[in-house]
């Protein structure tokens, strides 16, 4: 049995309810997955106290407003767990933690994600204005920028469909995104997947050297499945093979190719809105890679969609 472990960042906002509803729709009554619901309560206690006092002792030292927030989180966490249980998840699939921050909310979530060897982090996207993001920052943005390769799922609004859009090209990072999707939705009969390749004006035509794929998938697999489609590329064939190996029926996987539009991010947003996709699964180039004046495709998509889950891999 393949068990998948998901870390869910929980707070008291309405965004958390969107996360729970999404998980219930995607994974209802699947025993091979477990969730750790984690709330981090920030506070101004001295670092020495943070290092030496346990959570119960810290609760007695913090100011009344912080104590109130902590107790409110406990109530909210109980309701979150109750909702997952009512959706059909078993008690053993759900772990909950409420902690005072040791570093920062972002730092503590990332630390837990690395320590616990989770397969993904789930966070809610808050509707901050550009000015607000510049002044106060964003937990979502912080986790995306500092997670060091762990897949992050950003839940933006209320997701109403299980249709999944996966932008693909001939790069390692996009095939890694498909690999993550294949592992996460293994044997899930409810999903519908569309592989999308954009040939728009500013789409990158770069093809990663085959040797870069060997470390993750092995030379034998790559020699067999990176042969390409009719156009000599493996935009669709390699992702389809990964999904097939994960037990996704071929009739649940579709191809979509577009030559219109100026750049790929624009076309992804267009098809998400036009064709009612609920999830986008995207590979992300390393943050040190030069992404040009338009920034990364995943960054542009994230800024321009709502009522969708965006899985950022890489």
Image: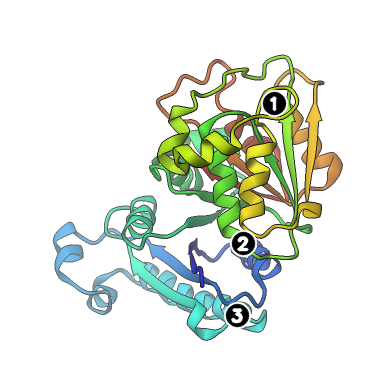
Question: Along the line of sight, which residue is nearer the eye, 252 or 203?
Answer: 252
Q: Do we see residue 97 in this rendering?
A: yes
Q: Which mark is residue 89?
A: 3
Question: Along the line of sight, which residue is nearer the eye, 233 or 49?
Answer: 233
Residue pictured at 43% horizontal, 69% vertical:
69
- Residue most toward the right? 274
Residue 221 vs 261, above or below: the answer is: below
Q: Which residue is mark 2?
A: 186
**Dot placed on the residue nearer the N-terminal end, 2 or 3:** 3
12 sits to left or right of 57: right
Pinpoint residue 55: horizontal percent, then vertical percent: 27, 74
Residue pictured at 51% horizontal, 73% vertical:
1
Label 2: which secondary element:
loop
Residue pictured at 27% horizontal, 79% vertical:
56
Residue 236 vs 114, above or below: the answer is: above
Q: Which residue is mark 1?
A: 264
Crowding around mark 1 (Cα neighbors within 10 Å: few <14, some 14 to 19, many 20+) is: many
Q: Do we see residue 314 in this rendering?
A: no
Residue pictured at 73% horizontal, 26% vertical:
198
Question: Along the line of sight, which residue is nearer the eye, 94 or 100?
Answer: 94
Residue 285 vs 123, above or below: the answer is: above
Label 3: which secondary element:
loop
Between the C-alphas of marks 2 and 3, the distance is 17 Å
């Amino acid at each position: 049995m393949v068990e998948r472990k998901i870390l869910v960042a929980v707070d008291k906002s309405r965004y958390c309810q969107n996360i729970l509803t999404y998980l219930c729709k995607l994974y209802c009554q699947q025993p091979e997955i477990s969730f750790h619901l984690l709330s981090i309560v920030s506070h101004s206690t001295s670092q020495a106290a943070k290092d030496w006092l346990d959570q119960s002792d810290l609760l007695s030292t913090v100011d009344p407003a912080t104590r109130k927030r902590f107790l409110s989180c406990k109530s909210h966490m109980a309701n979150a767990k109750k909702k997952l249980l009512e959706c059909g998840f078993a008690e053993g699939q759900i772990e909950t933690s409420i902690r005072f921050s040791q570093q920062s909310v972002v730092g503590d979530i990332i630390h837990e994600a690395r320590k616990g060897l989770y397969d993904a982090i789930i966070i809610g996207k808050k509707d901050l204005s550009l000015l607000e993001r510049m002044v106060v920052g964003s937990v979502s943005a912080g986790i995306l920028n500092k997670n060091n390769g762990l897949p992050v799922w950003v839940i933006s609004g209320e997701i109403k469909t299980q249709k999944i859009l996966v932008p693909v090209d001939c790069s390692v990072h996009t095939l890694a995104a498909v690999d993550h999707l294949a592992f996460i939705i293994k044997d899930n009969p409810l999903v519908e997947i569309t592989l999308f390749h954009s040939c728009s004006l500013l789409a990158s035509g770069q093809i990663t050297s085959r040797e870069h794929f060997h470390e993750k998938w092995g030379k034998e697999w790559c020699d067999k499945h990176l042969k390409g489609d009719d156009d000599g590329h493996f935009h669709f064939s390699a992702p389809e093979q990964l999904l097939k190996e994960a037990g996704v029926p071929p009739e649940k996987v579709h191809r979509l190719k577009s030559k219109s539009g100026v750049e790929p991010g624009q076309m992804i947003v267009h098809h998400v809105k036009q064709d009612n996709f609920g999830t986008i699964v995207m590979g992300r180039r390393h943050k040190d890679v030069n992404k040009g004046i338009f920034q990364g495709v995943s960054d542009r998509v994230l800024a321009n969609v709502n009522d969708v889950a965006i899985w950022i891999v890489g």
